[in-house]
Image (cartoon, coloured by chain):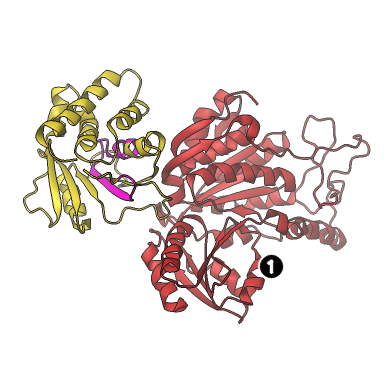
Chain colours: A red, B yellow
Amino acid sequence: MNNGAVLTGEHFLNGDVACAEGALAAGCNFFAGYPITPATEVAERMSRRLPKTGGIYIQMEDEIASMAAILGASWGGAKAMTSTSGPGFSLMMENIGLGMMTETPCVLVNIMRAGPSTGLPTLVGQADVMQARWGSHGDYGVIAISPASVQEMFDLTIEAFNLSEQYRQPVFILSDEVVGHMYEKLVIPPAERIHRIERRKPEKRPDEYVPFMGEEDLVPPMACAGEGYRVHVTGLTHDEMGYPHMFHTTQERLVRRLVDKIRLNADKIIRLESDFMEDAKVVVIAYGCVSRSAREAVERARSKGLKVGMLRLITVWPFPTKKLRELAGRVETFIIPEINYGQVAYEVERCAGDRAEIVQVGIMGGTVHSPEDIYDVIEEFAQ
Amino acid sequence: MTDKRGEKQEIRVAGFGGQGIVLAGNIIGKAAALYDNLNAVFTQSYGPEARGGSCCADVVISSGTIHYPRVTTPHILVLMSEDAKNTYLGSITGSCRILIDEDLVNLQDLPEGSDLYKIPSTRIAEKLGRKIVANIVMLGFIASVTDLISYDSMKKAILASIPKGTEELNLEAFEQGYQYGKTHYASTG
């Protein structure tokens, strides 16, 4: 790729813009969206950059249409993305389900602000974690990634595209206002050093192709419009040929595969950063902007001899159930600071059962925990 | 003078919308991160108004990793409006360098442990023909009276951040702010 899409070099940019640059570096060539604070800068950057790199930018009439547009673009062979925040994320839910059901690769960026409803439009929140997991009706598997720096907004947006292509489904960047709006140094590597995964194409002849037959990893190769294959795409329960088939046996095969292609590949998808764990009695679990405050608090506590570890969720979904169950056997307390009233904390509780104490440190939105907020709780439980 | 640039430094620039406060913060961060080879995080807060609302730019600079991105107790506080003074003067604890536009901020009671540096940055900008470069005058002054950012790096960051065709005006504004500091506060920084 030599179309100016990869801005190799050092930059001082905000997280939203870094996300847009990551998308371009990943090969994104279609963006449809509707501006909303604090995600507007993603769309703004794409609107300036995409036309110059041979891509298409469309501002749609709303978020429902934006999500529909990127699904269509993806079936047309594009690498497609949209970005939004809480209220727009809610509007996208119906078509997220369509994307999951039709196994359509695309990336959806949610720069979280405080809700419910209009909430605090310009201020940070992290309360869409469960919505990202369960927001659209029906069962499906979810991949959601939570960057904690400007560099990660770039790197992990590439990762999101790669995962969406690999597992053939919408992948979420679940970021927040603080990371989206803060400026840091971003290093963009040379184009040839950017690892890109492209969707698997059918190797069979058109008359032998079974469009929704999962391969060994449960993901079917994808033939897009114009590639000579006949593909029927529907949100109805469909058989392996893609045709509607209203029987529980077909539903059983299809939905199990949609969930299992993430569930059974979870170990390959999950990314964690784990530090100071060897002798930790207390472990702080955080993600996104809060993980930065948590990290500072944990380092301070370590310097005072407190036996505390730090687990950062880089992927929030799929949840690292196995890791948490293992930790719960030897850790006494999990401290979970997050900008909501206990969403990841709820998952940790599910994994730990009654084998470890769960301490929620929730803020309802509008600000991020200071390191002191978290340190005080560590001190209370690690003494 | 001791070189404090290795330690974590917090700087807050505050004024009202339209003064170029956010751009000033951006330039400071860019100078540190891209040209002074330090880590820098720049964050901002502003009201819904396009102009005239209160406005604040925060930069954290360190040779080490910066985790928590917010400014809590600024080491350098730049004030360009009375509102900003009323809002942010209270955030100071311990030693702080306070830089003000002396025509826009009336500061009588200096918090204990802080030093005051005054410049008529808006007036200097007006004499250059464009009031909007008052922020760049202030950046020159910051480079001059603090050891936060080097002269060269600040200049490079300004050039990398302004519209084409305005280089001469902005560099003159930067230079005048810098020289004002050297002339009036020769023994410091």
Please report, as a chain letter, where disc 1 is located. A
Q: Position of residue A4 (x, y in %)?
A: 57, 25
Which residue sits furthest bottom? A354
From the viewer's side, name the closer residue of A248 and A84. Answer: A84
The residue to which callout 1 is attached is A322
Q: Is residue A124 above or below residue A345?
A: above
Q: Position of residue A210 (x, y in %)?
A: 88, 44
Q: Is residue B60 visible?
A: yes
Residue range of the region highlighted in magenta in the rendering: B5-27
Figure label count = 1
Let me know if residue B44 is in the magenta part.
no
**Who's the residue at 71% across and 39% down the image?**
A197
The quarter of the picture where residue B173 lies is top left
From the viewer's side, name the closer residue of A26 and A111. Answer: A26
Q: Position of residue A271 (x, y in %)?
A: 63, 55
B48 sits left or right of A308 in the view: left
